[in-house]
Image (spheres, rainbow, N blue to C red):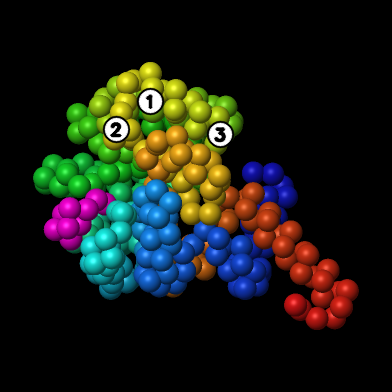
């Protein structure tokens, strides 16, 4: 992270809330489940699948974690009722991971059992490296308990990832493979752009060699092209993998992939905790934080020119 990036990240809490909302609204469906469903319906109409995420990272009380688990029950009921092509993604810190491991496991099982009742699927998201061991532990525990409608996420930024693939291989996990956006120390994570890419391709090959279903989650043109070649080299059919992208990002690339016959899933977050989610994403990704700084500076100049805040 550059000195300018650090300065931007430190000043983020002072950024006006409406400015954060304006930047983030492209990437967040809205505050209510109905907002997410409208977005998913539109995506489905364009040949794209979705995964819905209820925002609520880093809860501080057990009742907050249980409330989020219960909200996922409403999500599955609505997916069924509206016949939407969507699964769900959960963040373990939203379900109590930092409070108590067993509390988190109970909450995840609530979500997974509800998903199973409707033949749906739950993706356990990966957060920063402080959560990696417990996330993989929980995934293994639930798989050992017989839950098959469950997937996990691995990040190519982390040096451990290919070893994690080998460790998980006997389970043939359903894995979303992404670069990872968290700023991690050099002893834990690759820092160079090319190193992260190389590890991504290595992890993708290892997952396919192990017979895993992979969600190729990237907006990087280079990795999209390499992934297409890798799945072709492995003789994968269109039902053996999928591409995944964030809402509002590289939509032209997503359209092209769908047009070429690839399955594509879009991540659709929603919730009243949009501000907390947005601030964490911005602090973890200084490039987007820089966009906010530019927007704020432009607003200041506008006020200076005409004395109003349009």
Q: Can you give x and y, in whole percent of width and height, for residue 2 in the image?
A: 69, 44
User: Residue at left 37%, top 65%?
Assistant: 37
Q: Secondary structure at mark 1?
A: helix
On screen, residue 100 versus residue 159, left or right, reads left
**Callout 2–callout 3 Cβ contact below 8 Å:** no
Q: Which quadrant: the N terminus?
A: top right
- Using the rendered view, name the quadrant where residue 232 is placed: top left
Q: Secondary structure at mark 3?
A: helix
Residue positioned most to the top: 233
Distance from label 2 to label 1 (Cα)? Answer: 9 Å
Q: Which residue, given by chain and number where applicable, does mark 2 sit on?
A: 240
Q: Can you give x and y, in whole percent of width and height, for residue 23 in the image?
A: 61, 62
Neighbour class for label 1 at 10 Å: few (<14), some, many (≥20)?
some
On screen, residue 285 versus residue 56, left or right, reads right
The answer to which of marks 2 and 3 sits earlier in the sequence is 3
What segment carries the magenta color? 112-122
The answer to which of marks 2 and 1 sits earlier in the sequence is 1
The answer to which of marks 3 and 1 sits earlier in the sequence is 3
Residue 221: give its label.
3
Q: Can you give x and y, in whole percent of width and height, for residue 190 in the image?
A: 52, 32
User: Residue at left 64%, top 49%?
Assistant: 287
**Callout 2–callout 1 Cβ contact below 8 Å:** yes
């Amino acid at each position: 992270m550059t000195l300018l990036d650090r300065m931007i990240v430190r000043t983020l809490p002072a950024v006006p809330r409406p400015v954060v909302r304006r930047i983030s609204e492209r990437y967040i469906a809205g505050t209510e489940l109905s907002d997410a469903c409208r977005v998913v319906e539109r995506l489905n109409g364009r040949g794209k699948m979705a995964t819905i995420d209820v925002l609520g990272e880093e809860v501080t009380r057990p009742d907050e974690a249980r409330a989020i688990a219960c909200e996922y029950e409403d999500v599955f009921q609505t997916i069924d009722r509206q016949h939407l092509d969507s699964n769900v993604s959960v963040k373990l810190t939203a379900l109590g991971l930092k409070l108590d491991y067993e509390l988190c496991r109970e909450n995840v099982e609530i979500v997974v059992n509800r998903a199973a009742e409707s033949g749906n699927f739950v993706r356990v998201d990966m957060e920063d490296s402080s959560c990696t061991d417990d996330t993989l532990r929980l995934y293994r525990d639930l798989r050992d308990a017989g839950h098959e409608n469950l997937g996990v996420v691995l990040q190519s930024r982390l040096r451990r990832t290919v070893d994690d693939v080998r460790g998980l291989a006997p389970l043939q996990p359903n894995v979303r493979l992404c670069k990872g956006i968290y700023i991690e120390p050099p002893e834990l994570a690759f820092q160079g752009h090319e190193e992260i890419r190389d590890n991504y391709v290595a992890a993708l090959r290892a997952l396919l060699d192990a017979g895993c279903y992979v969600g190729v989650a990237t907006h990087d043109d280079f990795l999209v092209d390499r992934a297409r070649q890798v799945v072709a080299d492995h003789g994968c059919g269109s039902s053996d993998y999928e591409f995944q992208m964030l809402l509002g990002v590289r939509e032209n690339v997503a359209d092209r992939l769908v047009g070429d016959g690839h399955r594509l899933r879009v991540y659709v977050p929603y919730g009243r905790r949009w501000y907390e989610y947005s601030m964490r994403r911005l602090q973890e990704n200084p490039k987007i934080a820089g966009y906010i700084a530019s927007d704020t500076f432009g607003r200041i100049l506008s006020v200076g020119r005409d004395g109003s805040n349009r």
